[in-house]
């Protein structure tokens, strides 16, 4: 019985909440790459030096050393891990390499209301036109329009967009 109590305490301390799908990847890919009728997953396995290069650029590298670009025309999905669980950010790029759009495809039960509030405030509009090397500033644009926790989540989404920009700039072309 004591193992059950310990497991319950450990679960509470780890603050694990289930992930919910806000938008399916195929729907996000279709919206981010209008006109594309077929999509392909292009996987890039990062070497240790490449993973380090990405980590140095944006303080992140994929957990398994794998980047996946879903291409119709151009696009990338990036997962952002936060203290409140993962958020998956899909970033679409136009043929010139600029951000066409950003969709949030997954969040946790806990973060979903915060994500939705930030999105309603126009968070993703701030990312259009960014190119690798630019710094996303969506959170600063919605900070006065949302509560404290949605503003925090907007900052985490900024990190996801920054990671997608860095990954796209370094490993896609």
Image (cartoon, rainbow, N blue to C red):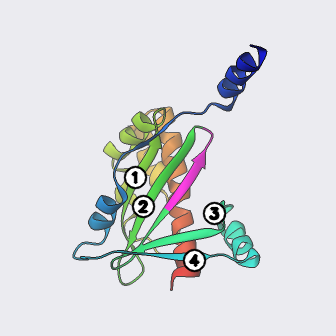
User: Which segment did they paint magenta?
Assistant: 78-83
Q: Is residue 138 above or below residue 64?
A: above
Is disc 3 surrounded by few (<14), some (14 to 19) or many (20+) residues within 10 Å?
Answer: some
Q: Is residue 114 above or below residue 156?
A: above
N-term mark: 2 or 4: 4
N-term mark: 3 or 2: 3
**Residues at badges 1 and 4 in contact (C-beta under 8 Å)?**
no
Q: Which residue is mark 4?
A: 44
Give the main secondary structure, helix, strand or loop, of the magenta stretch: strand
Element class at badge 3: loop
Q: Which residue is mark 3?
A: 62
Is disc 4 surrounded by few (<14), some (14 to 19) or many (20+) residues within 10 Å?
Answer: some
Q: Which residue is mark 1?
A: 105
Measured as percent of width and height from the top left, residue 90 is found at 42, 61
Is disc 1 surrounded by few (<14), some (14 to 19) or many (20+) residues within 10 Å?
Answer: many
Q: Quadrant of the N terminus?
A: top right
Nearest the viewer among 155 and 54 is 54
- Can the viewer see residue 132 in this picture? no
**Residues at badges 1 and 2 in contact (C-beta under 8 Å)?**
yes
**Spatial separation of the CA atoms under disc 1 and disc 4:** 21 Å
Q: Which residue is mark 2?
A: 90
């Amino acid at each position: 019985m004591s193992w059950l109590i310990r497991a319950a305490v450990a679960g509470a301390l780890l603050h694990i909440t289930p992930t919910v799908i806000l938008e399916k990847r195929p729907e996000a890919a279709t919206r981010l790459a209008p006109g594309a009728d077929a999509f392909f997953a292009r996987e890039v396995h990062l070497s240790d030096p490449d993973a380090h290069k990405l980590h140095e650029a944006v303080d992140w590298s994929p957990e398994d050393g794998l980047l996946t670009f879903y291409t119709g025309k151009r696009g990338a999905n990036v997962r952002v891990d936060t203290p409140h669980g993962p958020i998956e950010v899909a970033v679409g790029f136009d043929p010139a390499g600029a951000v066409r759009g950003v969709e949030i495809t997954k969040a946790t039960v806990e973060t979903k209301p915060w994500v939705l509030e930030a999105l309603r405030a126009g968070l993703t509009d701030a990312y259009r036109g960014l190119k690798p090397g630019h710094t996303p500033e969506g959170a600063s644009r919605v900070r006065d329009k949302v509560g404290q926790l949605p503003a925090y989540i907007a900052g985490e989404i900024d990190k996801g967009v920054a990671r997608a920009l860095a990954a796209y700039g370094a490993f896609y072309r």
